[in-house]
Amino acid sequence: MSIDVKHLAKLARLRIEDDKLAKFEKDMESIVAMVEQLPEVSGDASGLDPEHPMKLREDVEGTTEALGTDKLTRSELLANAPKMQAGCVVVPKTVE
Amino acid sequence: MELYEYSAHELSKMLSEKKCSSEELTKSVLDRAAATDEKVGAYLTVCAEEALKKAREVDEKRAKETLHPLAGIPIGIKDNISTKGLLTTCASKMLYNYVPPFDAFVMKKVNAADMVVTGKLNMDEFAMGSSTENSYFKKTHNPHNLDCVPGGSSGGSAAAVAAGSAVISLGSDTGGSIRMPASYCGVVGLKPTYGSVSRYGLVAFASSLDQIGPFGRNVTDTAMLYGVICGHDNMDATSADREYPDFTALLNSDVKGLKIGIPEEYYGDGVDNSVKETVMNAVKELEKQGAQIVNISLPSTGYALNAYYIISSAEASSNLARFDGVKYGYRTENYDSLIDMYEKTRSEGFGDEVKRRIMLGTFVLSSGFFDAYYKKAKLVAIEIVKEFNAAFEKCDVIATPATPATAFKLGENIGDPTKMYAADICTVTVNIAGLPAISVPCGRVNNMPVGLQFIGRKFSEQTLLNAALAVENNYGEAKPVNV
Amino acid sequence: MEYETIVGLEVHAELNTKTKIYCNCKNAFGLEVNTQICPICTGMPGTLPTLNEKVVEYAVKMGHATNCSINNVCKQDRKNYFYPDLPKAYQISQADIPLCENGYVEIMMNGEEKRIGITRIHIEEDAGKMLHNDAFQGSLVDFNRCGVPLIEIVSEPDMRSSAEAKAYLDTLKSILQYIDISDCKMQEGSIRCDVNVSVRPKGSTEFGKRVEMKNVNSFSGAMRAIDYEANRQIEALERGEEIYQETRRWDDQKGMNILLRSKEDAQDYRYFPEPDLTTIYMPLERVEELKNSLPELPNAKIKRYVKELGLSQVDAELIAENLPRCRLFDECIKLGGCTAKNVSNWVLADVSKYMNETGKDIADSNLTAEKLVKIITLIESGKISNNSGKIIFEEIIQNNADIDKVIEEKGLVQISDDSAIEKLVNEVMAANQKSVDDYRGGKTNALGFLVGQCMKASKGQANPAKCKELVLKYLNG
């Protein structure tokens, strides 16, 4: 099966340089050829398991101790951001 | 004998009897790391000062109160586990400068037990790989043979423990990333039941498969560390709400009546003959000691690797989408638009293996392919669970080789992704079924360690630890390797 | 050719829970940028979501209120796309199994009921906000809104005009307010909608190509957007052009839309089950409990007001459309002692005027149902005049005054005693003989003047109806 690496890269916000494209295509094709060998099994794949439902969180603010979350300031939380201004993360101009 | 050479359970006793201090011990381990890591390359970050400071604090605290058995014992942490204030890079350029503002659940447990963190350990980038060659920063070498890989993705965690540059360590296992390097490096590695250790703070690779687990040079150390990190966490919706026993106190190497299942599918063509033989010899020793061997079948095993790569890559493609240069980590230098910034950041920040998996995951989830790949893989996963359930009607544990061969040479598989993927063939089923499994050394082939893998029912870690202890008693505890 | 407009709406309503949907950050609007955030809602590596139980309950309530069937076993899925206001680069939402589906609401169009189908209602998280400033090169991201709980209510393409769409939106809004799960503050963006519009020749049963419009921020904006888009499509068809399935962006200021994405660029969201969350399960007893906990909904109220209380359809709708108004009305009716019609008049006139002028909820004022009923009862029994009632109302609002004291201090007791008024009338007639003669000579408009003079002479305390009756009696006598 031929794999449209450029299309996949676009969806995944990756850019594959032209000199690497052939190698990626070859790799992707052999990987897909490997993984696509699967038996025909029918059934429900949704994985729903009402016998073991998820425990939901109580709608209570600030139970930080119980939830194990740390109270963090804005500057601590955004300390890793590459670019900041006026308490906000900065990105290239967007329109939508 | 140097302090770093002792096991955690020996050191626990020595510390409580004041035969040594945590500061001396930590210094010994740090010195060992300084002496060996140039060759082994297990550490990405060594935090010597912080470790010694913590060790001194624990020594002072010990004078006043009774501490946790692992208090004061140095531990190394895989670099995909969030450590507050300490670089957590996932061995990726993408997170080369990322310092988490919070601790992972397991780090809270480790800190509460007063363990001493010596540093962060190398791995395959974002835990994707079977050799630790995919690290952006450095390659880790197998202490048993520096030309060989330590396995992956938790290669640094296994190599550090094997070399004595860590007494114990934490790794993570998505498809074999604890058991395979444990096997290659001749140490014990436990992949716990899915849900028994909180994933909060573990940088996600494949959320439905990831699990944090312990490494030790022996079963007792591994059991002690597992006892620290397991437990319910209401921050992780997939965390099991249950109580856990004192695994160390209940360790028992008596295998009389233990039914050991041998699945023919794990002893097939893909597995090296001498590895098979070594593993079977170890099982036969247990039979002599009163265990029963039962032949079982797990017919879908042949499809497991395919299902694994589909499911894990699908989840990874989504989990790794957040690395976009906006909030943390790497951002490309020059860009002229948002899309340009995204694409350059992600192309420059991720290595090729990560890109392949992201693209595979994107492909199997994309419009028109979902049913043929992702849905089918999920159905195969359901089959695998059913087959394990049926097998555990007949046996208590399943014994298999942990890896199809011993550690391969650096660079040997790097050009061929599918060949590299095949190294996970013995381990992926366990993650798919959410089961616990342990790899314990059971001899050598060509002077390289071989790991025996025991797979158990959900939450049967005690049974696995006990069976592994029986093997260990026959082969001896591992000691730090001369590097 | 005559065309028919087909409208379907996707309404996003923010839920008024205390905390966000997947973390326990405060769910609040308008606070300083990036202060209501934590590692979870900013998508820090290694963080995990936990689902807020109230979000599930609120969505199930909305499902019941819109006659949906409830999928009490369901799950969440990831919708993958890149945008700076979406920190995880996926939105946790619901794909193939929504919490609620196959329902409907009834809207009133020109006095007739029309049923609008609800395809589904699902739960999901809101994204952050992008801040733009022309003086600044880039855009800024505020993550405060990330993880605010949303329900998305998807309608069937059952609306045939912008007016129907408006009626549908108003109905949804009042339901959301009645069951108290959303603040419905348009200006804060707590209800937003995407509009799907297509047109077809009248009489045709096939649907035309559907155009989706984003960035519709108000109900009136939705009407303008629908009318504009329907016209655009009709004009294109008239020119012999084809309509393409595409996404367009509505610009309310310019009153027009522009192409955002063509079908070829349609995003591939790569939905798959959220592995960090497991099965959502609500026991059927709880599902029923929530159904029984619903208050009387707007449509039922309107019907009751018309049928049982004899209000006009218009008045009934006006009262029911506003929750504080209809709470006050219902309380007054429950207290009893005065006619529904008069309560309705007071609620729609003086009370509404007060609420509109001050922007305040009546519940936060000094006026209570008891006080209002007392005023109306006093008027109905003739003890005070309508005008005096208004004076008392003002006194209550301004000074929280005691009704009896106001009547006494301001001398508002109305003179209804026949003999007293008759005496007064006789005096006034005598003093205005010219007007009496005018009236008797055929100039009937002199009546108003004479009654007015009587009222004046009584310092406004005479019962006007009685006054008029007795003046007429005098003139015709």
Image: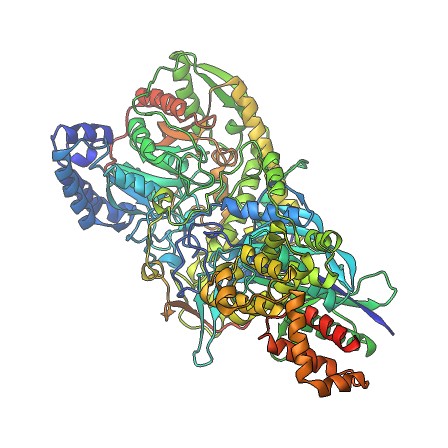
Residue B136 in the image: above or below residue A81? above
Residue C417 in the image: above or below residue B480? below
Residue C277: give x, y in percent of width and height. Answer: 51, 43
Residue C396 seen = no
Q: How many marks?
A: 0
Q: Quadrant of residue C425?
A: bottom right
Of the 4 image quadrants, the one containing the N terminus of chain B is top left
- Please tell me which residue lies in front, C279 or A37: C279
Residue A10: give x, y in percent of width and height. Answer: 56, 63
- Please tell me which residue lies in front, B379 or C205: C205
Residue A27: give x, y in percent of width and height. Answer: 54, 52
Q: How is the image coloured?
A: rainbow
Q: Quadrant of residue C444?
A: bottom right
> Is C70 situated left or right of B232 in this image?
right
Residue B394: give x, y in percent of width and height. Answer: 53, 17
What residue lies at 43% left-to-right and 78% top-to-bottom?
Answer: C136
> Is B18 situated left or right of B368 in this image?
left
What residue lies at 68% left-to-right and 57% top-to-bottom?
Answer: C340
